[in-house]
Amino acid sequence: MNRRRFLSALGAGPAALCASAQDERRLSGITVSGIEIFRVRVNRLGNWVIARVRTSAGLSGLGDASHSGAGDPSAAKLSEYAAWMKDRSIYDIEWLRRRAHPEVAQRGRAVSCALSAIEQALYDVQGQAAGVPTFQLFGGKLRETVRNYANINRSTEQRNPVAFAKMAESAVAAGFDAIKLAPFDGMPRNGSAAEIEAHTRLGVECARAVREVLGPRGDLLVDAHSHFDRERGMDLLRRLEPLNLFWLEEVTRPLEDLAAINRAAPMPTAGGESLFGLRENLDYIRAGAVDILMPDVKYCGGMLEMKKVAAMAEGAGMPVAPHGPASPVGNVAAAHVCVGLPNFQILEFAHGEMDWRRELIDPPERLEKGMLAVSGRPGFGISLNEKTAARYRAA
């Protein structure tokens, strides 16, 4: 019995109320019984790792632990954390967080991705048990849909202006009016001045080609993936200024250099996708590193951590634009938080990685003109298509 039926039973007499109270105790006593792990082959940049947590009530929830590193080290951690949670309440999320957090310093994303995936799955189950969409557990929603930009970087194999423009055309045809690329990937970290200049010039030309596809009204986002030092980063600002960027992302790594570039930037800046937990995000905010914070639900510590990070950014007067070139499960989980964030700006969507993305979950992501609708069904409102997961199973 879900809570709606429970409340309706209040007026149905003592016997019905007693039965309802028993059902309430059953729902509150749901425990974790096991986990299934699905590794799905995507492309050269890695697999999707999906967790499905089973419970004593027969309900199951989904979570995304993708992109934790070569060989998907999050998969082993998923099994370990599921063993920790065995027979524990589906509401013991803070207990799991406190036990897993100290491991992040040693194991990095293997820990953060696994922790987040199980946490996502537990919130999915909690919503199902309560008979409400998961976003209701995070304060409800402020908007019906969340805006997405198309990340075409992962799907563009030839790193040249023609290839980026072609993938941008595909994104525009799919309804997106905001597109991101990382055109400086491949730049040698210790290259000569001539090599770095050549890669910089090529990257700017790739960004210009995408701007031409988008036209003057579309939003162009450029990710520098920290390939620049302070001096070359300052020069990059000058080169990219004519392209009227929506944002420039993560030009360099040292916080003091990133903050200096941010102060000089004529366009908005964004970053923070790799940060874990409140402390790392707080240091980033205090440093004035960027204008827009980008917590990733997989990397930052989960849905609850994303909500906390966003609230901290809100207090600092900063918008959030969650990072996440994730599986459909990860995107749905992030969207259930984003739909209720007062300072939400835009969410990431990995466009063009494969043509079967829509088949992985049922129902498929409801994405129209770059706007993702969040289901009103209990939990995340989705299930995993096991046939698709099996067909593209990673070796």
Image (cartoon, rainbow, N blue to C red):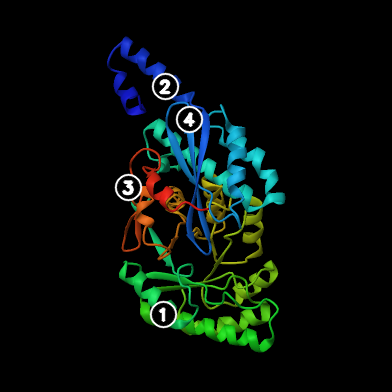
Amino acid at dot 4: Thr
Label 1 vs 2, first from the N-terminus: 2
Callout 4 touching callout 2 (CB < 8 Å): no
Label 3 vs 4, first from the N-terminus: 4
> How far separated are the C-alphas under marks 3 and 4?
22 Å
Would you place residue 37 above or below residue 316 in this image? above
Amino acid at dot 3: Pro
Q: Residue at the spot x=32%, y=47% of the render?
A: 363
Disc 2 packing (10 Å; few <14; some 14–19; many ≥20): some
- Residue 102 lies, in percent from the top left, at 70, 44
Q: State which mark lies toward you, 1 or 3.
A: 3
Residue wearing tag 1: 211
Q: Residue furthest top?
A: 15
Q: Residue furthest bottom?
A: 194
> How far separated are the C-alphas under marks 1 and 3?
33 Å
Residue wearing tag 4: 55
Would you place residue 378 above or below residue 67 in this image? above
Q: State which mark lies toward you, 4 or 2.
A: 4
> How far separated are the C-alphas under marks 3 and 2?
29 Å
> How far separated are the C-alphas under marks 1 and 4?
49 Å
- Residue 76 lies, in percent from the top left, at 61, 44
Residue wearing tag 3: 363
Callout 3 touching callout 2 (CB < 8 Å): no
Residue wearing tag 2: 24
Disc 3 packing (10 Å; few <14; some 14–19; many ≥20): some
Amino acid at dot 2: Glu
The answer to which of 392 and 359 lies nearer the viewer is: 392
Give the quarter of the image for residue 289.
bottom right
Q: State which mark lies toward you, 1 or 4.
A: 4
Of helix, strand and loop, which one carries label 3? Answer: loop
- Residue 263 lies, in percent from the top left, at 61, 74
